[in-house]
Amino acid sequence: MPGAMTGQLEKRTIMQIQEVLSAYHKDLQEVEKCLNRHISSEVKLIPKVSHHLIDSGGKRFRPLLHLICASLCGYQSDNRFPMAAVMEFIHTATLLHDDVIDQAIMRRGKTSANNIWGNAASVLVGDFLYSKSFTLMTEIGNMQILKMMSDVTNIMSEGEVFQLVKCGDFNLTEEEYLTIIRKKTAVLLSAACSSGAILASASEDKVAALAHFGLKIGMAFQMTDDTLDYMAKEKDFGKAIGKDLEEGKMTLPLIYALKKAKPAERKIIKENV
Amino acid sequence: MPGAMTGQLEKRTIMQIQEVLSAYHKDLQEVEKCLNRHISSEVKLIPKVSHHLIDSGGKRFRPLLHLICASLCGYQSDNRFPMAAVMEFIHTATLLHDDVIDQAIMRRGKTSANNIWGNAASVLVGDFLYSKSFTLMTEIGNMQILKMMSDVTNIMSEGEVFQLVKCGDFNLTEEEYLTIIRKKTAVLLSAACSSGAILASASEDKVAALAHFGLKIGMAFQMTDDTLDYMAKEKDFGKAIGKDLEEGKMTLPLIYALKKAKPAERKIIKENV
């Protein structure tokens, strides 16, 4: 595609994103209020660690997906705000635990929480946010949502353990990689979408369609993220570049590189991980 | 109390405990089946880590309390088994996370999970067991139970963070200590008891009475555990002795020792933590 055309396309995409963000500006402000209200605790380290991550330029992608899908299904109740907050809380909890697991130094362009307050605080505040999410959902009071979200968080931890087990395994297949990213990332984006339909009491077909839509976005999102780990500039990416290769985390770019490499090249890659 | 009398009392207590265990033997076997069924996963590391801890001689104290209280309120449904399993899963999840936080070497007389499989596996399998607990509760389908248990897990993490913040703080008051153990330990034992009454649709008074009973047991249990950390033999205790002092964890024996110590003695204690 010629450069000028790519530029035009990018410009149009950015304008469309801004249009969506502006349409949901008020709703997103309500979600922010909800986030702030529910990370308060008499134990001051909890809001401190939570705010460090939650205020550090997260895109609120999951809450936004929820709000859009709820609105698409005609849902107008204020319950969409705590439900959107749940998506962000669960996402934040996984980031806190992930950073302990990966011994991360940076997250979203800032020093990671585990690097400032230690592993213990990150593990425990992650636990706090997980449980707070379930408290919020019991207040919403929809058993189908609770069932889905407990399954989702369970699948997410399963995906993370699977990734852990397969770390450094050069025989990881593309199919196994797809299982990992579906479990660790895509199911939450899927739930962000379908929960909008469930709260709206939409038909099973609509719930399934939005779940499918979210799942595909999640897969694409994680593949992009894994590719950026090889290609992005650190200041744009907000976290260290090349970490996956360094840690022996098998992602799609590496799987493809190994597939296309000559035996001698493959040997070099393997020796350097 | 004369030695012979203590011996008699101990013997009677042990006989009474054996009587209870034998009365609930069949029910506890059902709970075991439930535990085994729900820690299965295609990701084999998950049952491996879970079994390591769950099969390592836990007393099933929380499940037993639940079964007894459910029975006391006339509850006969099979839902008491997954509910009892939930108590053990949540307890196990906290042990997995605690051992990461405390960098524990031993647990229940065995090498701790974090020491064998690393922090990452312990954090993630803990997350797996937490979320599995909520899945089991959505299957039971009682919203009051879900509300209580999400609050309980939230309070537990708050208690753990409070303990973390106060680590090494020699000014910790007895009242603050009591808050910590209530939050990190007693609320779960309280829930183990009251959930029996809730499932049985017992009156609010009965639910509150059993919650209160469980809370008191929990407080006594943690105080005993904290005292044994100073007094027990390692082979009886199942974990390293003197860890609390070593880590600067302020527990009741230390609070009392500091209170009773002369300034010179206090100085020695503080310098050695």
Image (cartoon, coloured by chain):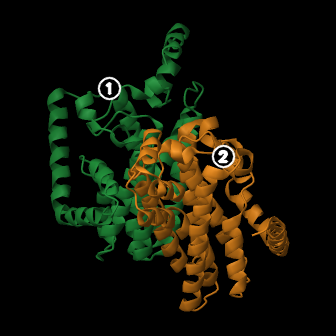
Chain colours: A green, B orange
Q: Residue at x 32, y 61 (%)?
A: A39
Which quadrant, please, contains the N terminus of chain A? top left
Whether residue B143 is situated above or below residue A56 in the rendered picture? below
Residue A260 x %, y %: 49, 18
Q: What's the residue type where badge 2 is placed? A: Lys
Name the foreground residue: B266 vs B137.
B266
For marks 2 and 1, give the one nearer the viewer: 2
**Dot 2 lies on which element?**
loop
Residue B179 as seen in the image, left or right of residue A230:
right
Marks 2 and 1, how far apart in space? 48 Å
Give residue B239's mark.
2
> Residue B184, image x and y in percent?
50, 61
Task: Give residue A231's mark.
Answer: 1
Quadrant in which residue B22 is drawn: bottom right
**What subunit carries mark 1?**
A
Query: Circle 1 — which element?
Result: helix
In the displayed structure, A31 sits above or below B12; it is above
Q: Do dots 2 and 1 share one subunit?
A: no
Q: Nearer the viewer, residue A166 or B239?
A: B239
Q: Amino acid at mark 1?
A: Met
